[in-house]
Image (spheres, rainbow, N blue to C red):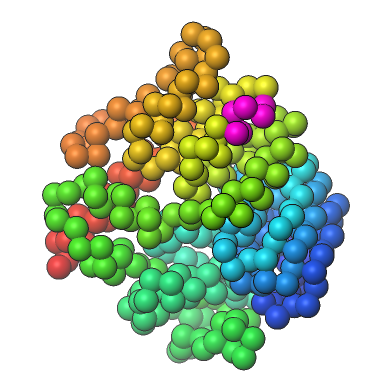
Amino acid sequence: DNGQEVGQPAAFLEYLSSSCPLKELDISLNRIDYRAAIVLEDFLSQNSRLRALDLSHNPLGPVGIRSLIRLLVYEESGLSRIHLEGCSNGEHPSAIPDLQFINTNNPGGHYMLQLDRPDHRSLLRMLYKSCDRLGIPASQAFSHVQYSRGNYSHPSVGGDGVYEVRTDGRLQATFKVEKAIHQSMKVDEDDFVTFFQKRNEKMRLYPSERKQLLLFNVWRTVAKVMPDQVVFLNALARDIHLPFSLVEQFCRSCTNPSEVVCKLFPSFSSFVVDRCLLLMHARSISDVTHVLGNVSKLMFFNVENPTGHYRLDLSNPADYSVAESLVLLDSWESALKQG
């Protein structure tokens, strides 16, 4: 079966726990897809030994690239070099009927997991690690739990620091952490701007100076090929907060800086000054027109008065950012009503 064949690397990579002694790993040209990528994100996020990872020419697609970019930014990861050339050709999220994917900015949702699948086990472990990071008991975050093999008990952490999740059966559960996030921020009920700023600081990934250099090194390799460049920029815009200085270097080192501006416009959160400065990298009137046409809905989005009718293209990072903001505002108000 082709699906099983493509999923075999994920089963192998699951054994690369945080105690794996490898310093370099070359798994290029191995038909590795988004399923293996989420396993790598899970197991290598706290691995300080592995320094170099070559994933070039694998069909990771947008979902897989997003996992690998997050992995690169995690401060606990020891990666200092990663190759992602030729990895944009993979399944689009809309073409994956059984896609189960964690949005680290907003991990809440209903999950249907096949625990005999390595990628689903990794996703479950990442949900538990989200609880640890936020200081929330798993029993509070998980609700409406249904397990095909009877009663389900939350796993413990093994001696290697890895959650020992079940490896069989189907698990359905609702994962909610918004109430705990909101309670920890202590923001006035009508202060939407401060809410977004504090929530971004808590949930989005902020790369250190060392990690910024790694991101730029990856950018220099993928910027030469348009499909790779687009997928890389889309992944950055959705998960990573970027400093203006790094995005400026991206613009200066490519032939089409207006496209970089369009894609990375949401990565500054609500920092209006940085966004306005970024527009200066549009080289002509036509470039400015192109940029404004792509980012206008985010640029003029009023978080303090968001009521209105929206027509958004979710493949556009700026429009996606508006949609995500509306979802977060709705969840925040729901959490406030619940007390």
- Quarter of the figure with the C terminus: bottom left
Is residue 53 found inside the magenta-colored segment of the image? no
Secondary structure mostly seen in magenta is: helix
Residue shown at 16%/66% (left/top)? Answer: 338
In the displayed structure, 338 sits above or below 94; it is below
Q: Is residue 236 left or right of residue 132?
A: right
In the displayed structure, 173 sits above or below 32; it is below
Q: Which residues are magenta?
A: 249-254
Q: 186 or 329, which lies in front?
A: 186
Image x and y of residue 104, in percent: 47, 59
Q: 326 or 71, which lies in front?
A: 71
In the displayed structure, 151 sits above or below 172; it is below
Which corner quadrant of the image does residue 1 belong to? bottom right
Q: Does any portion of residue 119 appear in the rendered image?
A: no
Which corner quadrant of the image does residue 193 belong to? top left
Is residue 251 found inside the magenta-colored segment of the image? yes
Residue shown at 33%/45% (left/top)? Answer: 325
- The residue at the far top in this view is 285
Q: Does any portion of residue 299 appear in the rendered image?
A: yes
